[in-house]
Structure formats: C-alpha cells, structure tokens
Amino acid sequence: MVKKGIIKYFNLTKDNEIILSEDKIINSKICFDFLVDTINKSSFKLVKLIKTKNSFNELLLEDKIGGILKISFILRSISGAGWKDKPHIKRVQVPNVSNNLVETNNIELKSHFIIFGFYNFDNNPIFSAWDGKRYLFHKTIRSCYLNIETLQRGYDQKYIETINSSQKIWVFLPDKFDRFIESFISYDK
C-alpha cells in the first residue's frame, strides 16, 4: 500500500546505483557537524565558526600559509525538488537572505558566500555547492537544483565542476574539500 501524498525520488545507494525511494532528509545539526568534521580533516584550520540566528553562518579558515578566508554560507540537506513528474531533480532550498544582509551587514559582497548542499542517503556523504551571491537579492525562497545523475558522477569522479540548471555547481566528496575551496576562491575573484 502506497502512502497518500508521499513523493518518491531517485536516490543513490552506497553502490552508487540509482533507486526510486522516499528521501531521507538529514537534519541541520548533522549537516553542520559533518561540515565541521570535513573542515577539521582538511588542510585548512578552522579559526572561528559563527552560527547566526539568521539564515546563514560564517567561517574563518586559515590556509596553509597563514592567510585567513572569510566564508559566509548556508548549509542545507539535498532533497527531492517536489515535482512528481521529475523525480531525478534534487534541490537545496535557499531562504531570502537579503533582509539579513541589510540588517546585519554580515555578508560582505567582497567575502565568499557559498550555498552548500549535503547528501547522505545510504551512508555515502557528498557535498554540492553553488555561488551564494546569485541568491542574495531574491525576494522569495529560492532553490538550487541538481540532477541525481550529477551526484552519481560526483561519487564516481570524487570531484566535479559542472553546469546544472544554467548554474555552475561543484560536487565533491568530503576529502576533496581543499580542492573545492581553492577552486571556489579562484572562481569568486
């Protein structure tokens, strides 16, 4: 018997096979803890982590030569896009942060602003990332999209930079965090 109102989406198993199933939404604390653990295993030193009451958070990271990177970010679980007819599309919902920008002035246009998506369906964690500055001034909640096949390719290759829904995205395993940050910083200059 199928539960009424439940939408099934394509998800990835530990063997990197695509299956149709209910999503497993990862709670924000688990996503956050996993990101911090990923940073701690990277070559970057976590200098400061600021959890704000607003929609975003901030990191200060020290690189290998002592430089400090300021990164404002949003971190959300990757889930199905909400469309029954497009079960292969995944998303990260992005709240409107423009009001927070004006009120708190925490996101500086010169700092780096990243939207992270975290996916861990069958104990196979992976991140995706989008340029957050593209979402700063939307008046409503928006979504960053990617296809399940993009996540699958990210698992296969461990790190990819590609285009989905007319936007550049990065998909990477946790041990490729350094490579992602270096690429994003270069892209965001």
Image: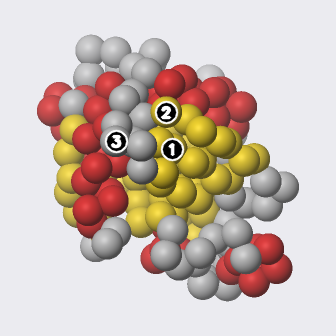
Is 40 displayed left or right of 103 in the figure? Answer: left
Query: Residue 177 appears in which quarter of the rendering?
Result: top left
Real-space Cα separation, disc 2 to disc 3, in angstroms: 11 Å
Question: Mark 3 sits on what residue?
Answer: 65
Checking the image for residue 8, the label placed there is none
Tell me, yes or no, if residue 131 can be seen here: yes
Query: Which dot, 1 or 3, sits closer to the camera?
Result: 3
Question: Mark 1 sits on what residue?
Answer: 61
Q: Secondary structure at mark 1?
A: strand
Are dots 1 and 3 in contact, CB under 8 Å? no
- 72 and 2: which one is in front? 72
Real-space Cα separation, disc 1 to disc 3, in angstroms: 11 Å
User: In the rendered view of the protein, which quadrant contains the C terminus?
Assistant: bottom left
Give me the residue at 50% from left, 38% from top. 118
Give me the residue at 35% from left, 48% from top. 181
Question: Mark 2 sits on what residue?
Answer: 45
User: In the rendered view of the protein, which quadrant contains the N terminus?
Assistant: top right
Real-space Cα separation, disc 1 to disc 2, in angstroms: 6 Å
Residue type highlighted by circle 3:
Ile
- 78 and 116: which one is in front? 116
Residue at the far front: name it: 66
Q: Give the mark nearest the N terminus, 1 or 2.
A: 2
Name the spot of residue 161 as percent of width and height, x first: 21, 52
Residue type highlighted by circle 1:
Leu
Name the spot of residue 81 as percent of width and height, x first: 50, 55
Tell me, yes or no, if residue 145 can be seen here: no
Question: Callout 2 environment at 10 Å: few (<14), some (14 to 19), or many (20+)?
Answer: some
Are dots 1 and 2 in contact, CB under 8 Å? yes
